[in-house]
Amino acid sequence: MNAHYELPLEDAGYSFGFLDEYAKKEVRRCILKAISIPGYQTPYASREMPMGRGFGTGGLQLTLSLIGADDTLKVIDQGSDDSVNAVNLRQFVQLTCPGVAVTEKTQEATLIQSRHRIPEKMLTEQQILVLQVPYPDALVVVEPSEARRKVMHGEADYSRLLVKLYEDVVRFDEITLSHRYPTRINGHYVIDPSPIPRWDVPRLHHSPALVLLGAGREKKIYAVPPYTVAAPLVFDDIAFRVEDFRDANGQRIACRCCGSIVSFLDELIDDAGRVTHQCSDSAYCEEQQETISARKQA
Amino acid sequence: MKNEMTMVETDIWHPAQQQKLFRSLLDAYSYPGRIQSCAAESSLSLLSALLDGQTTLSDPQDLLPESIWPKLEAQRVPYELAAFILLDGSRAPQMVPNLGTLEAPEHGATLLLRVASLHEDSAGTLRLQLSGPGIRQPVTISVDGLHADWIKARNDWVANFPIGVELLLCDTQRFVALPRTTRIVIGGEA
Protein backbone atom coordinates (compact mmCIF):
# COMPACT_ATOMS: atom_id res chain seq x y z
CA MET A 1 0.00 0.00 0.00
CA ASN A 2 1.22 3.47 -0.82
CA ALA A 3 1.70 5.19 2.53
CA HIS A 4 1.62 8.63 0.94
CA TYR A 5 -1.73 8.14 -0.71
CA GLU A 6 -4.35 10.65 0.30
CA LEU A 7 -8.00 10.41 -0.50
CA PRO A 8 -9.28 13.10 -2.84
CA LEU A 9 -10.63 15.88 -0.65
CA GLU A 10 -14.17 15.21 -1.76
CA ASP A 11 -14.03 11.61 -0.54
CA ALA A 12 -12.08 12.26 2.63
CA GLY A 13 -15.08 13.27 4.69
CA TYR A 14 -17.34 10.94 6.56
CA SER A 15 -20.04 9.10 4.72
CA PHE A 16 -23.66 10.11 5.20
CA GLY A 17 -24.65 9.35 8.76
CA PHE A 18 -21.06 9.02 10.09
CA LEU A 19 -21.29 5.23 10.55
CA ASP A 20 -19.96 3.05 7.77
CA GLU A 21 -22.50 1.04 5.80
CA TYR A 22 -21.55 -2.26 7.48
CA ALA A 23 -22.19 -0.77 10.91
CA LYS A 24 -25.55 0.58 9.77
CA LYS A 25 -26.55 -2.75 8.26
CA GLU A 26 -25.76 -4.56 11.48
CA VAL A 27 -27.78 -2.09 13.53
CA ARG A 28 -30.62 -2.34 11.00
CA ARG A 29 -30.72 -6.13 11.17
CA CYS A 30 -30.83 -5.89 14.97
CA ILE A 31 -33.66 -3.35 14.84
CA LEU A 32 -35.75 -5.72 12.72
CA LYS A 33 -35.14 -8.59 15.15
CA ALA A 34 -35.93 -6.28 18.06
CA ILE A 35 -39.29 -5.42 16.49
CA SER A 36 -39.98 -9.11 15.79
CA ILE A 37 -39.30 -10.04 19.42
CA PRO A 38 -40.92 -7.12 21.29
CA GLY A 39 -39.00 -6.15 24.40
CA TYR A 40 -36.09 -8.55 23.80
CA GLN A 41 -32.68 -6.94 24.27
CA THR A 42 -31.00 -7.72 20.96
CA PRO A 43 -27.21 -7.61 21.31
CA TYR A 44 -25.28 -5.60 18.74
CA ALA A 45 -21.72 -4.39 18.21
CA SER A 46 -22.04 -0.88 19.57
CA ARG A 47 -19.52 1.30 17.74
CA GLU A 48 -17.17 3.88 19.17
CA MET A 49 -18.77 7.27 18.62
CA PRO A 50 -17.06 10.64 18.89
CA MET A 51 -18.63 11.14 22.32
CA GLY A 52 -18.47 9.25 25.57
CA ARG A 53 -20.59 6.17 26.15
CA GLY A 54 -23.45 7.24 28.35
CA PHE A 55 -24.09 10.42 26.35
CA GLY A 56 -26.66 8.83 24.09
CA THR A 57 -24.44 6.79 21.77
CA GLY A 58 -26.98 3.96 21.63
CA GLY A 59 -29.77 6.29 20.59
CA LEU A 60 -27.47 8.08 18.19
CA GLN A 61 -26.43 4.86 16.45
CA LEU A 62 -30.11 3.99 15.99
CA THR A 63 -30.85 7.47 14.63
CA LEU A 64 -27.90 7.40 12.23
CA SER A 65 -28.88 3.95 10.95
CA LEU A 66 -32.46 5.06 10.36
CA ILE A 67 -32.04 8.55 8.99
CA GLY A 68 -32.30 9.56 5.34
CA ALA A 69 -32.06 12.90 3.57
CA ASP A 70 -35.84 13.34 3.58
CA ASP A 71 -36.18 12.96 7.37
CA THR A 72 -36.96 15.69 9.86
CA LEU A 73 -35.24 15.16 13.17
CA LYS A 74 -36.11 16.37 16.65
CA VAL A 75 -33.74 15.76 19.56
CA ILE A 76 -34.83 16.29 23.15
CA ASP A 77 -33.22 15.83 26.52
CA GLN A 78 -35.53 15.63 29.54
CA GLY A 79 -38.23 17.22 27.40
CA SER A 80 -36.10 20.16 26.32
CA ASP A 81 -34.78 20.84 22.82
CA ASP A 82 -32.21 23.27 24.16
CA SER A 83 -30.23 21.36 26.77
CA VAL A 84 -26.61 20.48 26.11
CA ASN A 85 -27.09 16.80 25.28
CA ALA A 86 -29.87 17.53 22.80
CA VAL A 87 -28.04 20.41 21.12
CA ASN A 88 -24.83 18.41 20.75
CA LEU A 89 -26.54 15.37 19.27
CA ARG A 90 -28.61 17.49 16.92
CA GLN A 91 -25.57 19.39 15.70
CA PHE A 92 -23.70 16.14 15.19
CA VAL A 93 -26.48 14.75 13.01
CA GLN A 94 -26.67 18.00 11.04
CA LEU A 95 -22.91 17.86 10.51
CA THR A 96 -22.84 14.25 9.33
CA CYS A 97 -26.19 14.01 7.52
CA PRO A 98 -26.38 16.86 5.01
CA GLY A 99 -29.91 17.52 3.80
CA VAL A 100 -31.63 16.39 6.98
CA ALA A 101 -34.05 18.95 8.39
CA VAL A 102 -34.30 19.56 12.12
CA THR A 103 -37.24 20.84 14.06
CA GLU A 104 -38.38 21.52 17.60
CA LYS A 105 -42.03 20.87 16.82
CA THR A 106 -43.06 17.33 17.70
CA GLN A 107 -45.68 17.09 14.96
CA GLU A 108 -43.18 18.07 12.22
CA ALA A 109 -40.60 15.42 13.11
CA THR A 110 -40.37 12.03 11.39
CA LEU A 111 -37.64 10.88 13.75
CA ILE A 112 -37.44 11.86 17.40
CA GLN A 113 -34.44 11.02 19.54
CA SER A 114 -35.13 11.53 23.19
CA ARG A 115 -33.43 11.23 26.53
CA HIS A 116 -35.77 10.43 29.42
CA ARG A 117 -39.10 11.74 28.04
CA ILE A 118 -41.79 10.89 25.54
CA PRO A 119 -43.17 14.09 23.95
CA GLU A 120 -46.50 15.28 25.38
CA LYS A 121 -48.04 15.38 21.92
CA MET A 122 -49.46 12.07 20.74
CA LEU A 123 -47.10 10.49 18.23
CA THR A 124 -48.34 9.23 14.86
CA GLU A 125 -47.67 6.26 12.60
CA GLN A 126 -45.40 8.46 10.50
CA GLN A 127 -43.01 8.97 13.41
CA ILE A 128 -40.33 6.88 15.10
CA LEU A 129 -39.25 7.54 18.67
CA VAL A 130 -35.68 6.62 19.63
CA LEU A 131 -34.96 6.53 23.35
CA GLN A 132 -31.48 6.64 24.86
CA VAL A 133 -31.03 3.94 27.46
CA PRO A 134 -28.40 3.84 30.22
CA TYR A 135 -29.42 0.50 31.81
CA PRO A 136 -31.37 -1.80 29.51
CA ASP A 137 -32.05 -4.73 31.81
CA ALA A 138 -34.84 -4.44 34.36
CA LEU A 139 -33.59 -7.65 36.02
CA VAL A 140 -30.16 -6.25 36.86
CA VAL A 141 -31.35 -5.19 40.33
CA VAL A 142 -32.16 -8.79 41.25
CA GLU A 143 -29.69 -10.90 39.25
CA PRO A 144 -26.05 -9.91 38.59
CA SER A 145 -25.28 -12.63 36.01
CA GLU A 146 -26.22 -11.69 32.46
CA ALA A 147 -26.29 -15.35 31.37
CA ARG A 148 -28.76 -16.12 34.13
CA ARG A 149 -30.82 -13.00 33.28
CA LYS A 150 -31.08 -14.12 29.67
CA VAL A 151 -32.59 -17.43 30.80
CA MET A 152 -34.99 -15.61 33.14
CA HIS A 153 -36.07 -13.30 30.31
CA GLY A 154 -36.52 -16.23 27.94
CA GLU A 155 -38.71 -18.03 30.44
CA ALA A 156 -40.50 -14.78 31.32
CA ASP A 157 -39.56 -15.45 34.93
CA TYR A 158 -40.00 -12.14 36.72
CA SER A 159 -40.86 -13.46 40.16
CA ARG A 160 -37.80 -11.91 41.80
CA LEU A 161 -38.59 -8.54 40.27
CA LEU A 162 -42.10 -8.78 41.69
CA VAL A 163 -40.62 -9.63 45.09
CA LYS A 164 -38.52 -6.46 44.83
CA LEU A 165 -41.64 -4.42 44.13
CA TYR A 166 -43.44 -6.21 46.95
CA GLU A 167 -40.67 -5.26 49.38
CA ASP A 168 -41.33 -1.64 48.43
CA VAL A 169 -45.00 -2.07 49.17
CA VAL A 170 -44.24 -3.62 52.56
CA ARG A 171 -41.85 -0.82 53.54
CA PHE A 172 -43.50 2.24 52.05
CA ASP A 173 -47.05 1.13 51.21
CA GLU A 174 -46.35 1.89 47.58
CA ILE A 175 -43.94 1.05 44.78
CA THR A 176 -41.37 3.82 45.02
CA LEU A 177 -39.84 3.67 41.54
CA SER A 178 -40.03 7.16 40.05
CA HIS A 179 -38.61 6.28 36.65
CA ARG A 180 -37.34 3.22 34.72
CA TYR A 181 -40.56 1.48 35.71
CA PRO A 182 -40.43 -2.21 34.61
CA THR A 183 -42.92 -2.66 31.81
CA ARG A 184 -44.07 -5.90 30.24
CA ILE A 185 -44.24 -5.87 26.46
CA ASN A 186 -46.69 -8.07 24.57
CA GLY A 187 -47.17 -10.28 27.62
CA HIS A 188 -43.62 -11.65 27.69
CA TYR A 189 -40.45 -9.59 28.09
CA VAL A 190 -40.15 -7.02 30.84
CA ILE A 191 -38.14 -4.01 29.73
CA ASP A 192 -36.49 -1.10 31.41
CA PRO A 193 -38.22 1.63 29.40
CA SER A 194 -35.23 3.99 29.95
CA PRO A 195 -35.48 6.64 32.69
CA ILE A 196 -38.79 8.05 31.49
CA PRO A 197 -41.06 9.13 34.34
CA ARG A 198 -44.04 6.96 35.25
CA TRP A 199 -46.15 9.59 33.48
CA ASP A 200 -44.82 8.39 30.12
CA VAL A 201 -45.17 4.65 30.67
CA PRO A 202 -48.87 4.40 29.70
CA ARG A 203 -48.00 6.14 26.43
CA LEU A 204 -45.99 3.12 25.32
CA HIS A 205 -49.17 1.07 25.38
CA HIS A 206 -50.65 0.76 21.88
CA SER A 207 -48.55 3.68 20.66
CA PRO A 208 -49.19 4.35 16.96
CA ALA A 209 -45.48 5.10 16.55
CA LEU A 210 -42.63 2.61 16.72
CA VAL A 211 -40.47 3.05 19.85
CA LEU A 212 -36.85 1.95 19.61
CA LEU A 213 -34.54 1.86 22.61
CA GLY A 214 -30.77 1.87 22.25
CA ALA A 215 -28.16 1.26 24.95
CA GLY A 216 -24.71 2.06 23.53
CA ARG A 217 -22.62 1.16 26.55
CA GLU A 218 -24.53 -2.06 27.21
CA LYS A 219 -24.69 -2.87 23.48
CA LYS A 220 -28.41 -3.64 23.35
CA ILE A 221 -31.30 -2.61 21.11
CA TYR A 222 -34.91 -3.31 21.95
CA ALA A 223 -38.26 -2.15 20.69
CA VAL A 224 -41.87 -1.55 21.53
CA PRO A 225 -43.65 -2.07 18.21
CA PRO A 226 -46.75 0.02 17.39
CA TYR A 227 -50.12 -1.16 18.69
CA THR A 228 -48.53 -3.49 21.22
CA VAL A 229 -49.52 -4.17 24.79
CA ALA A 230 -47.14 -2.43 27.22
CA ALA A 231 -48.19 -3.07 30.80
CA PRO A 232 -46.33 -1.74 33.83
CA LEU A 233 -45.53 -4.52 36.31
CA VAL A 234 -48.07 -4.33 39.13
CA PHE A 235 -50.03 -6.47 41.55
CA ASP A 236 -53.72 -7.31 41.23
CA ASP A 237 -54.60 -5.24 44.29
CA ILE A 238 -52.14 -2.38 43.81
CA ALA A 239 -52.76 -0.37 40.69
CA PHE A 240 -50.08 1.47 38.75
CA ARG A 241 -50.28 5.20 39.18
CA VAL A 242 -48.50 8.12 37.58
CA GLU A 243 -47.09 11.23 39.24
CA ASP A 244 -49.58 13.25 41.21
CA PHE A 245 -49.36 16.98 40.54
CA ARG A 246 -51.93 18.15 43.06
CA ASP A 247 -51.11 20.64 45.79
CA ALA A 248 -52.05 20.37 49.48
CA ASN A 249 -55.59 21.50 48.64
CA GLY A 250 -56.05 18.83 46.02
CA GLN A 251 -55.81 21.34 43.15
CA ARG A 252 -53.90 20.29 40.03
CA ILE A 253 -50.77 22.46 39.80
CA ALA A 254 -50.56 24.44 36.55
CA CYS A 255 -47.46 25.21 34.49
CA ARG A 256 -46.16 28.67 35.44
CA CYS A 257 -45.55 29.55 31.77
CA CYS A 258 -48.49 28.16 29.81
CA GLY A 259 -50.95 27.27 32.55
CA SER A 260 -51.36 23.70 31.32
CA ILE A 261 -52.91 21.33 33.84
CA VAL A 262 -52.50 18.20 31.77
CA SER A 263 -48.74 18.02 31.18
CA PHE A 264 -45.83 16.49 33.09
CA LEU A 265 -44.28 19.20 35.26
CA ASP A 266 -40.73 19.93 36.41
CA GLU A 267 -40.34 21.37 39.89
CA LEU A 268 -38.20 24.50 39.99
CA ILE A 269 -37.06 26.93 42.66
CA ASP A 270 -37.41 30.51 41.43
CA ASP A 271 -35.18 33.48 42.38
CA ALA A 272 -37.28 34.25 45.41
CA GLY A 273 -36.82 30.70 46.70
CA ARG A 274 -40.40 29.63 45.97
CA VAL A 275 -41.24 26.25 44.49
CA THR A 276 -42.80 26.61 41.03
CA HIS A 277 -43.73 24.18 38.28
CA GLN A 278 -43.18 24.25 34.56
CA CYS A 279 -43.90 21.89 31.66
CA SER A 280 -41.05 19.45 31.14
CA ASP A 281 -41.75 19.31 27.38
CA SER A 282 -40.52 22.74 26.23
CA ALA A 283 -41.91 22.45 22.68
CA TYR A 284 -45.37 21.62 24.07
CA CYS A 285 -45.18 24.53 26.53
CA GLU A 286 -44.18 27.03 23.83
CA GLU A 287 -46.99 25.86 21.59
CA GLN A 288 -49.50 26.30 24.41
CA GLN A 289 -48.20 29.81 25.03
CA GLU A 290 -48.46 30.67 21.33
CA THR A 291 -52.04 29.40 21.25
CA ILE A 292 -52.92 31.51 24.27
CA SER A 293 -51.35 34.69 22.86
CA ALA A 294 -53.03 34.09 19.47
CA ARG A 295 -56.37 33.74 21.25
CA LYS A 296 -55.77 36.96 23.14
CA GLN A 297 -55.00 38.85 19.94
CA ALA A 298 -58.09 37.52 18.18
CA MET B 1 -18.50 16.25 2.50
CA LYS B 2 -19.81 13.60 0.21
CA ASN B 3 -23.55 13.56 -0.07
CA GLU B 4 -24.53 10.12 -1.25
CA MET B 5 -28.20 10.90 -0.83
CA THR B 6 -28.29 13.04 -3.95
CA MET B 7 -27.28 10.17 -6.23
CA VAL B 8 -28.78 7.32 -8.21
CA GLU B 9 -32.45 6.55 -7.65
CA THR B 10 -32.92 2.88 -8.44
CA ASP B 11 -29.47 1.39 -7.84
CA ILE B 12 -30.21 -1.14 -5.07
CA TRP B 13 -26.52 -1.30 -4.15
CA HIS B 14 -26.39 2.38 -3.35
CA PRO B 15 -26.39 3.31 0.37
CA ALA B 16 -29.11 5.94 -0.09
CA GLN B 17 -31.34 3.43 -1.82
CA GLN B 18 -30.61 0.80 0.84
CA GLN B 19 -31.58 3.29 3.54
CA LYS B 20 -34.92 3.84 1.79
CA LEU B 21 -35.42 0.10 1.45
CA PHE B 22 -34.61 -0.38 5.11
CA ARG B 23 -37.23 2.18 6.07
CA SER B 24 -39.78 0.26 3.98
CA LEU B 25 -38.67 -2.89 5.80
CA LEU B 26 -39.02 -1.09 9.11
CA ASP B 27 -42.59 -0.12 8.20
CA ALA B 28 -43.30 -3.66 7.04
CA TYR B 29 -42.10 -5.13 10.35
CA SER B 30 -43.75 -2.43 12.46
CA TYR B 31 -47.11 -2.82 10.74
CA PRO B 32 -47.30 -6.44 9.57
CA GLY B 33 -49.69 -6.96 6.70
CA ARG B 34 -49.02 -3.59 5.07
CA ILE B 35 -47.63 -4.31 1.64
CA GLN B 36 -44.54 -2.26 0.76
CA SER B 37 -43.13 -1.45 -2.68
CA CYS B 38 -39.60 -1.58 -4.04
CA ALA B 39 -38.18 0.17 -7.08
CA ALA B 40 -36.60 -3.08 -8.29
CA GLU B 41 -37.07 -6.85 -7.88
CA SER B 42 -38.12 -7.13 -4.24
CA SER B 43 -36.35 -10.23 -2.87
CA LEU B 44 -32.99 -9.17 -4.30
CA SER B 45 -33.52 -5.57 -3.15
CA LEU B 46 -34.21 -6.76 0.40
CA LEU B 47 -31.16 -9.02 0.41
CA SER B 48 -28.98 -6.17 -0.82
CA ALA B 49 -30.28 -3.92 1.96
CA LEU B 50 -29.84 -6.51 4.72
CA LEU B 51 -26.76 -8.59 3.96
CA ASP B 52 -23.06 -8.09 4.33
CA GLY B 53 -20.05 -10.28 5.15
CA GLN B 54 -21.08 -10.62 8.78
CA THR B 55 -24.22 -12.58 8.05
CA THR B 56 -25.21 -15.83 6.40
CA LEU B 57 -27.45 -16.74 3.50
CA SER B 58 -28.78 -20.01 2.17
CA ASP B 59 -30.21 -20.42 -1.31
CA PRO B 60 -31.05 -24.15 -1.45
CA GLN B 61 -33.05 -23.86 -4.68
CA ASP B 62 -30.38 -21.82 -6.50
CA LEU B 63 -32.68 -18.90 -7.14
CA LEU B 64 -29.85 -16.36 -7.10
CA PRO B 65 -27.53 -16.01 -10.09
CA GLU B 66 -23.92 -16.83 -9.19
CA SER B 67 -22.83 -13.30 -10.14
CA ILE B 68 -24.90 -11.79 -7.31
CA TRP B 69 -23.16 -13.65 -4.47
CA PRO B 70 -19.96 -11.56 -4.43
CA LYS B 71 -22.05 -8.39 -4.33
CA LEU B 72 -24.13 -9.63 -1.40
CA GLU B 73 -20.91 -10.59 0.45
CA ALA B 74 -22.90 -12.98 2.68
CA GLN B 75 -21.39 -16.28 3.78
CA ARG B 76 -22.93 -19.24 2.00
CA VAL B 77 -24.07 -21.78 4.59
CA PRO B 78 -26.44 -24.78 4.79
CA TYR B 79 -30.16 -24.16 5.24
CA GLU B 80 -30.37 -24.99 8.94
CA LEU B 81 -27.54 -22.62 9.89
CA ALA B 82 -28.53 -19.60 7.80
CA ALA B 83 -29.73 -16.26 9.16
CA PHE B 84 -31.41 -15.51 5.84
CA ILE B 85 -32.92 -18.08 3.49
CA LEU B 86 -34.24 -17.41 0.00
CA LEU B 87 -36.92 -19.83 -1.17
CA ASP B 88 -39.62 -20.36 -3.74
CA GLY B 89 -42.90 -20.03 -1.85
CA SER B 90 -44.84 -22.20 -4.27
CA ARG B 91 -42.90 -25.30 -3.17
CA ALA B 92 -43.77 -26.88 0.17
CA PRO B 93 -41.28 -26.48 3.04
CA GLN B 94 -38.76 -29.31 3.32
CA MET B 95 -36.69 -28.60 6.40
CA VAL B 96 -36.85 -26.73 9.68
CA PRO B 97 -34.80 -23.52 9.65
CA ASN B 98 -32.85 -22.17 12.62
CA LEU B 99 -35.45 -21.11 15.19
CA GLY B 100 -33.06 -19.56 17.69
CA THR B 101 -32.93 -20.48 21.36
CA LEU B 102 -34.64 -19.26 24.49
CA GLU B 103 -31.53 -17.26 25.44
CA ALA B 104 -30.83 -16.01 21.91
CA PRO B 105 -34.12 -15.91 19.98
CA GLU B 106 -32.64 -13.37 17.55
CA HIS B 107 -30.83 -16.28 15.87
CA GLY B 108 -34.17 -17.41 14.41
CA ALA B 109 -33.92 -17.22 10.61
CA THR B 110 -35.56 -14.75 8.26
CA LEU B 111 -37.15 -16.56 5.31
CA LEU B 112 -37.64 -14.68 2.06
CA LEU B 113 -40.35 -16.50 0.12
CA ARG B 114 -40.86 -15.57 -3.50
CA VAL B 115 -44.56 -15.64 -4.36
CA ALA B 116 -46.50 -14.80 -7.51
CA SER B 117 -48.47 -11.83 -6.17
CA LEU B 118 -49.62 -10.14 -2.98
CA HIS B 119 -53.05 -8.59 -2.55
CA GLU B 120 -54.27 -6.10 0.06
CA ASP B 121 -57.72 -7.71 -0.22
CA SER B 122 -59.06 -11.24 -0.62
CA ALA B 123 -58.41 -11.46 -4.37
CA GLY B 124 -55.61 -14.02 -4.04
CA THR B 125 -55.96 -17.76 -3.63
CA LEU B 126 -54.54 -18.05 -0.10
CA ARG B 127 -56.23 -15.71 2.36
CA LEU B 128 -54.38 -14.85 5.56
CA GLN B 129 -55.97 -13.14 8.51
CA LEU B 130 -53.39 -11.30 10.56
CA SER B 131 -53.45 -9.94 14.08
CA GLY B 132 -50.93 -9.19 16.81
CA PRO B 133 -48.41 -6.44 17.59
CA GLY B 134 -48.39 -3.67 15.00
CA ILE B 135 -51.89 -4.50 13.78
CA ARG B 136 -54.65 -2.34 15.29
CA GLN B 137 -57.55 -4.26 13.78
CA PRO B 138 -57.16 -7.77 12.32
CA VAL B 139 -56.48 -7.49 8.60
CA THR B 140 -56.76 -9.95 5.77
CA ILE B 141 -54.26 -10.08 2.94
CA SER B 142 -54.09 -12.72 0.27
CA VAL B 143 -51.33 -14.33 -1.71
CA ASP B 144 -51.01 -16.12 -5.03
CA GLY B 145 -48.25 -18.67 -5.41
CA LEU B 146 -47.67 -19.51 -1.76
CA HIS B 147 -47.94 -23.13 -0.64
CA ALA B 148 -50.32 -23.23 2.35
CA ASP B 149 -47.96 -25.61 4.17
CA TRP B 150 -45.59 -22.67 4.68
CA ILE B 151 -48.07 -20.92 6.92
CA LYS B 152 -48.90 -24.15 8.79
CA ALA B 153 -45.19 -24.91 9.33
CA ARG B 154 -44.49 -21.33 10.29
CA ASN B 155 -47.29 -21.36 12.85
CA ASP B 156 -45.66 -24.46 14.39
CA TRP B 157 -42.21 -22.84 14.37
CA VAL B 158 -43.41 -19.71 16.19
CA ALA B 159 -45.67 -21.54 18.67
CA ASN B 160 -43.12 -21.30 21.50
CA PHE B 161 -42.41 -17.59 21.69
CA PRO B 162 -39.76 -16.15 21.83
CA ILE B 163 -38.23 -18.71 19.47
CA GLY B 164 -39.38 -18.58 15.87
CA VAL B 165 -38.81 -17.26 12.38
CA GLU B 166 -39.71 -14.18 10.38
CA LEU B 167 -41.27 -14.46 6.93
CA LEU B 168 -40.88 -11.94 4.15
CA LEU B 169 -43.25 -12.67 1.28
CA CYS B 170 -41.94 -11.07 -1.90
CA ASP B 171 -43.74 -10.75 -5.22
CA THR B 172 -42.03 -9.05 -8.15
CA GLN B 173 -41.77 -5.54 -6.72
CA ARG B 174 -43.61 -5.69 -3.42
CA PHE B 175 -43.21 -7.41 -0.08
CA VAL B 176 -44.90 -7.98 3.24
CA ALA B 177 -43.33 -8.93 6.57
CA LEU B 178 -44.74 -11.50 8.99
CA PRO B 179 -42.76 -11.34 12.24
CA ARG B 180 -43.01 -14.25 14.69
CA THR B 181 -45.48 -12.30 16.85
CA THR B 182 -48.09 -12.08 14.10
CA ARG B 183 -50.98 -14.51 14.49
CA ILE B 184 -51.90 -15.91 11.10
CA VAL B 185 -55.18 -17.68 10.41
CA ILE B 186 -55.53 -19.26 6.98
CA GLY B 187 -58.70 -18.31 5.15
CA GLY B 188 -59.64 -15.19 7.12
CA GLU B 189 -62.50 -12.88 6.27
CA ALA B 190 -62.04 -9.82 4.04
Image: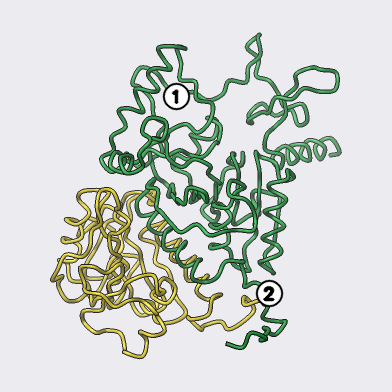
Q: Dot 1 lies on which element?
A: loop
Per the rendering, the colour in which chain B appears is yellow
SS under mark 2: loop
Q: Amino acid at mark 2?
A: Gly
Q: Residue at x 45, y 61 (%)?
A: B27
Residue A221 picture location, percent across and down: 45, 51
Distance CA(mark 1)–CA(mark 2): 50 Å
Q: Is residue A143 above or below residue B108?
A: above
Q: Residue at horizontal 35%, vertical 39%?
A: A145
Residue for badge 1? A240
Which colour scheme appears in the figure? by chain
Residue that appears at 45% across and 38% down: A192
- A20 or A74: nearer the viewer: A20
Residues packed near mark 1 inside 10 Å, few (<14), some (14 to 19) or many (20 plus)? some
Which of the two labelled residues, at mark 1 and mark 2, occupies the earlier sequence position? 2
Q: Work out whether residue A126 or residue B129 is closer to the camera in this orientation and state it.
A: A126
Q: Residue at x 58, y 41 (%)?
A: A118
Q: Position of residue A123 (x, y in %)?
A: 56, 47
Relative placement, left or right, of B132 versus B152 is right
| Chain A rendering hue | green
Count of numbered marks: 2
Tag 2 residue: A13
Chain where mark 1 sits: A
Chain letter of the residue beneath label 2 in the structure image: A
Disc 1 residue type?
A: Phe
Vertical arrangement, residue A177 with respect to residue B43, above or below: above
Residue B117 position, x and y percent, is 30, 75
